[in-house]
Amino acid sequence: MARALTISTGLCLLFATACKKEEVVLRPDNQAPDYDAVPTVVVQNYVNRLFIDLLGREPVDLEMNAEVAALESADLSTDARIALVNKLMTSTAFVEGDSSYQHAYAQRTYESFKARFLEAVSDEVIDGFIANAAQAALDDSLSGDAQGASESNSALQRLLRLKNARIHYREGTINAIEMAKRMMFNAVYDEINMNSFNFINATFDNLLFRYPTDAEFNASYAMVDASSASILFGQSAQNKGGYLDILVNSAEGHEGLVRLHYRAFLGREPSTYEAYQLTSSFATDNDLRRMQRTILVGDEYAGLLNN
């Protein structure tokens, strides 16, 4: 069967590239920005962009004025930018309409992952799947079908884990790796990507931004469709859950989440060096907030490179 093949930016290539000594050439058009000369409108645009990307809304006038004043009083220092990003991600102080910035950020992250993996399906639709799964589990239990009840309950629990992902992420009990797995390990995802062929291709495309090679597909198919032990990316598993564990914890899976956020925040792919740097650190700590913050405090995102 024919499948489109694309080439991923593998970490082996990244390591090889990163080890080369590069000559740094300073050019007049590549100087560090003069932050003292940055117009207030540029700072306002930066604050507005952060609120939208992290909270899903624009700041109200009071928030805009306060955050612009704080950034300008600190001469747009990196520390000031980090403080603002951290505030929007983690502050538990009450905010009308949001409950708190922390709450709004977790909800925004959850919605962003749903947009990538689940075609932005609404929670109302997920609730419908949960209700159906609960009814199926009850029916199987009442009919004495122990195996059916077990399978229905497992499906129900996967849906509940999906729905609660935003809460668990906010509370720090799961990370972005687990968030990605929950997005793909549920009945909603299965309905969008019906049958094992589509499921495998979708998981590769959604997370790795490419389709599997023939060898990768065959190994994945054995796990997903036949519950047979097979090896993918040097790791062994024999069912759908194990297959997804391999995928989300792979070097390419980590790189895929880095690429996802470069695209979301900067509208472009990371360079080989950028991907290597951020993927290496993300693979170590799985800290999505730190990974996002690295991009969000940069001069490119802040719109300062041409000022």
Image (cartoon, grey):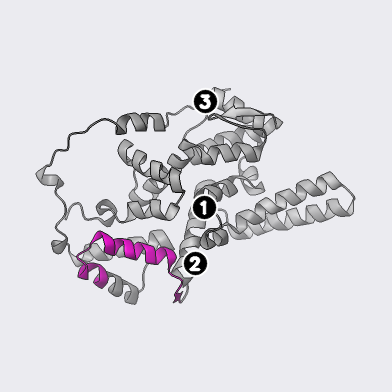
143 vs 39, left or right, is right
Specify the amino acid type for callout 1: Asn
Vertically, is 137 above or below 106? above
Vertically, is 23 above or below 304? above
129 vs 149, left or right, is left
Residue found 82% across the figure and 56% down from its top: 138
Please provide percent x and percent y for residue 306.
18, 52
Report crowding for label 3: few under 14, some 14 to 19, many 20 or more residues within 10 A (C-alpha): some
Asked if residue 88 lies in the magenta stretch, the reply is: yes
Asked if residue 288 lies in the magenta stretch, the reply is: no
Judging by the rendered image, the residue that carries numbered circle 2 is: 103
Quadrant in the picture for residue 9: top left
Q: Are marks 2 and 1 in contact (CB under 8 Å)?
A: no
Judging by the rendered image, the residue that carries numbered circle 1 is: 175
Give the magenta range. Answer: 69-95
Specify the amino acid type for callout 2: His
Judging by the rendered image, the residue that carries numbered circle 3 is: 213
**Camera-side residue: 122 or 231?**
231
Residue found 53% across the figure and 46% down from its top: 117
Q: Earlier in the sequence, mark 2 or mark 1?
A: 2
Numbered disc 2: secondary structure: helix
Q: Could one spot residue 132 in this view of the protein?
A: yes
Q: Residue furthest left?
A: 28
Numbered disc 1: secondary structure: loop
Numbered disc 3: secondary structure: loop
Vertically, is 293 above or below 232? below
Query: Marks 1/3: CA distance?
Result: 28 Å
**Camera-side residue: 167 or 265?**
167
Residue found 53% across the figure and 26% down from its top: 3
Specify the amino acid type for callout 3: Thr
